[in-house]
Amino acid sequence: MDHTMQADMEFKGSASLTNNNINVLKHVIGGLDLRIEAINQNIGRVYVVDQGGNMQPLPVNAQGLPVITMVDRAGIAVAPHNNEFLYIYGDSFVVSVDGLPVMRLDQQKQHSLMAQKQLQHDKIEL
């Protein structure tokens, strides 16, 4: 992925496949919002909605080409399915509008740390 084109991006939250939260990027194109949500613990989806929250067809330009595209970490296009892009745990993705990256989904490696209640916890950040 070309991260130089994405230099002006900032952290907006976590799109988790393990909860029911829906992330929304407002007014991504023509008054449409982009939603990111889990389908199950392995698959998520990215789609557009109008200001009423109603799912909309993925927009196309005058030539009938998709305006919103998604690629995986290797730069391979993710084909839309039923007006949404599906993504899986284990890869990272970039969503672009008119060729300009607007969102990046970075897969993270982490574990939940559980310990007995009586043990104190501290974290050393490096």
Image: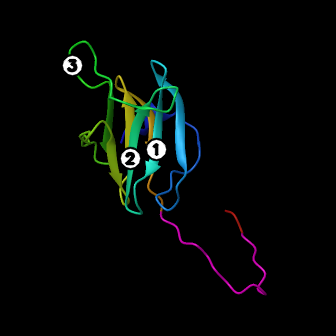
Residue highlighted by disc 1:
36
| Relative depth, front residue between 116 and 94 | 116
Question: Along the polypeptide, which appears first: circle 2 or circle 3?
Answer: 2
Q: Which residue is mark 2?
A: 45
Q: Secondary structure at mark 1?
A: strand
Q: Is residue 35 above or below residue 107?
A: above
In the image, taking residue 50 as reference, residue 112 lies left or right, namely right
Q: How was the colour assigned to the protein in this rendering?
A: rainbow
Nearest to the observer: residue 5 or residue 42: 42
Q: CA distance from mark 2 to mark 1?
A: 6 Å
Identify whether 8 is placed above or below 29.
below
Give percent across and percent down for residue 100.
40, 26
Q: Are marks 2 and 1 in contact (CB under 8 Å)?
A: yes
Question: Which amino acid does the dot numbered 1 rest on?
Answer: Ile
| Predominant SS along the magenta part | loop
Amino acid found under the numbered disc labelled 2: Arg
Q: Magenta part of the protein: which range?
A: 109-123
What is the crowding at mark 3: few (fewer than 14 residues within 10 Å), some, or many (at least 20)?
A: few
Q: Position of residue 28 (x, y in %)?
A: 48, 26
Q: Residue 82's quadrant in the figure?
A: top left
Q: Are marks 2 and 3 in contact (CB under 8 Å)?
A: no
Residue highlighted by disc 3: 64
Q: Let me know if residue 62 is in the magenta part.
A: no
* Quadrant hosting residue 68: top left
Vertical side of 1 occupied by 20: above or below: below
Tell me which residue sits at (75%, 84%) in the image: 117
The secondary element bearing badge 2 is classed as strand
Residue 77 locus on image (x, y percent): 25, 40
